[in-house]
Image: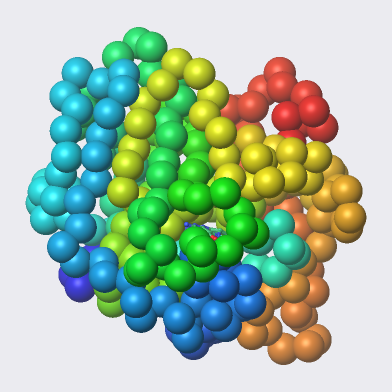
Amino acid sequence: MKAALNARYSSTEQPTAYADITGYNNFYEFGTGKDDPRRNAHTLRPRPWSVTISGEVEVPGTLTLEDILAPHALEERVYRMRCVERWSMVIPWVGFPLADFIKRFRPTSKAKYVAFRTLHDPKQMPGQRAGWLEWPYVEGLRIDEAMHPLTLLAVGLYGRLLPNQNGAPLRLVVPWKYGFKGIKSIVAIHFTERRPPTSWNVAAASEYGFYANVNPAVDHPRWSQASERRIGASLFDATRPTLPFNGYAADVASLYSGMDLRRWF
Ligand code: MTE
């Protein structure tokens, strides 16, 4: 895939190995173990694919993957990613800003939130026959978070198409939030005036808030969030302190000024 590096928005840290990025995953539609997605996600058929845009927009509609990609130049962005489970990676994503995509549909003044939905098809996603989450997986952002220049729709990593286990053919990447906000295999994007439900908040509201900003000062009820384990790093420097907003505070902290981040976790 042709994608120019966006240096302004890229970390200079050593990227995590391809085998770790594609072999240590959370994608509950294919099982709850870290290596289940790599073993099981071959049943997903990411092409042909289409995404429905609905709600508070002037131009709703259903677009094929080709329609989605056509107007956008792909960029490579090396992002630090931090999971709520305290592991982190550095991932060279290929994608384009979600803001550029959203502008095509002309959101109305009532579009305060953006809701995302994953494919629901137990034939392709056998984990959906189990009840460990409510299906389909859903996520949401406030419109200003969705329009932030760091927020990406990713279609690849390491210069290749996204492997199924990483959310082919299209997934969200929000580098200042815990990884679970990065919904995979998106089939619907809906603009709404009211805050939409999000899968992990529905599953355990006391553990996973709507915002899910990486915040070392707010513990998860069952563990501290002050540090993280970098996957693939040598034992010597595998554990490191977690930074506010995962190191992206200079870019995004202003989105949350005036909010009590202990309450809005
Ligand atoms: N999207 C869907 N549809 N289903 C999931 O189970 N897991 C989330 C997120 N997106 C998940 C999902 C979680 S918990 C994490 S940490 C990231 O995907 C993991 O992304 P990765 O496997 O590409 O690192």
Q: Nearer the viewer, residue 164 or 4?
A: 164
Q: Is residue 246 left or right of residue 252?
A: right
x 60%, y 28%: residue = 254
Vertical position of residue 195 compared to residue 227: above or below: above
Splitting the image into 4 quarters, where does residue 224 fall? bottom right
Vertical position of residue 164 compared to residue 234: above or below: above
Vertical position of residue 230 compared to residue 181: above or below: below
Indicate how the structure is coloured in the image. Answer: rainbow
Say which quadrant the N terminus sits in. Answer: bottom left
The spot of residue 101 in percent (x, y) is 25, 39
Splitting the image into 4 quarters, where does residue 229 fall? bottom right
In this view, the residue farthest toward the top is 109
Regarding residue 171, the answer to whether it shows in the image is no
Regarding residue 19, the answer to whether it shows in the image is yes
Q: Is residue 90 left or right of residue 263?
A: left
x 73%, y 53%: residue = 243
x 16%, y 33%: residue = 61
The spot of residue 46 in percent (x, y) is 26, 67
Say which quadrant the C terminus sits in. Answer: top right
Splitting the image into 4 quarters, where does residue 98 fall? top left
Q: Nearer the viewer, residue 236 or 39?
A: 39
